[in-house]
Amino acid sequence: MPIMKARIVRIGNSRGIRIPKPLIEQTGLGDDVEIVVQGNALVISPVGRPRAGWVEAFRAMAAHGDDELLDEARPTRWDEDEWQWR
């Protein structure tokens, strides 16, 4: 992987760095990122989606018959008297 050099610029009271578009596209960075200090380096990563992979997991559960409700449904009086299923 080629090494790129960049200059840290002043942004108000903070400092920033411009990340070239090809690097953003290659790494999948979006508007929000996570920054971690590792030793004397900053590691910038895309923010993971909290529910990433859930659809595939639910499909796998259904395929294995592991998608049943754990608790018995307990309808209320309103559910029994007022609710109409279509």
Image (tube, rainbow, N blue to C red):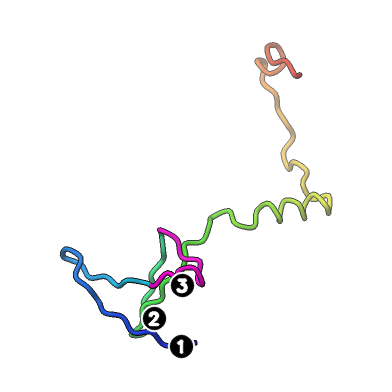
Q: Marks 2 and 3: which is nearer the front? A: 3
Amino acid carrying mark 2 in the image: Gln
Mark pair 3, 1: CA separation: 13 Å
Residue that extends furthest to the top in the rendered view of this protein: 81
Residue under numbered circle 1: 2
Mark 2 or 3, nearer chain start: 3
Q: Are marks 2 and 1 in contact (CB under 8 Å)?
A: no
Residue 5 versus residue 61: which sits nearer the camera? 5
Residue 28 versus residue 59: which sits nearer the camera? 28
Residue at point 71% right, 55% down?
Answer: 56
Residue 54 versus residue 1: which sits nearer the camera? 1
Let me know if residue 5 is in the magenta part.
Answer: no
Give the percent coordinates (x, y) of residue 82.
68, 12
Side (left or right) of 10 relative to 35: left
Q: Marks 2 and 1: which is nearer the front? A: 1
> In what element is the residue under mark 1?
loop
Quarter holding residue 33: bottom left
Q: Residues within 10 Å of mark 1 (few under 14, many from 20)?
A: few
Mark pair 2, 3: CA separation: 24 Å
Residue under numbered circle 3: 22
Residue under numbered circle 2: 38
Q: Residues within 10 Å of mark 2 (few under 14, many from 20)?
A: few
Q: Is residue 58 above or below residue 7?
A: above
Range of magenta residues: 20-31
- Quadrant placement of the C terminus: top right
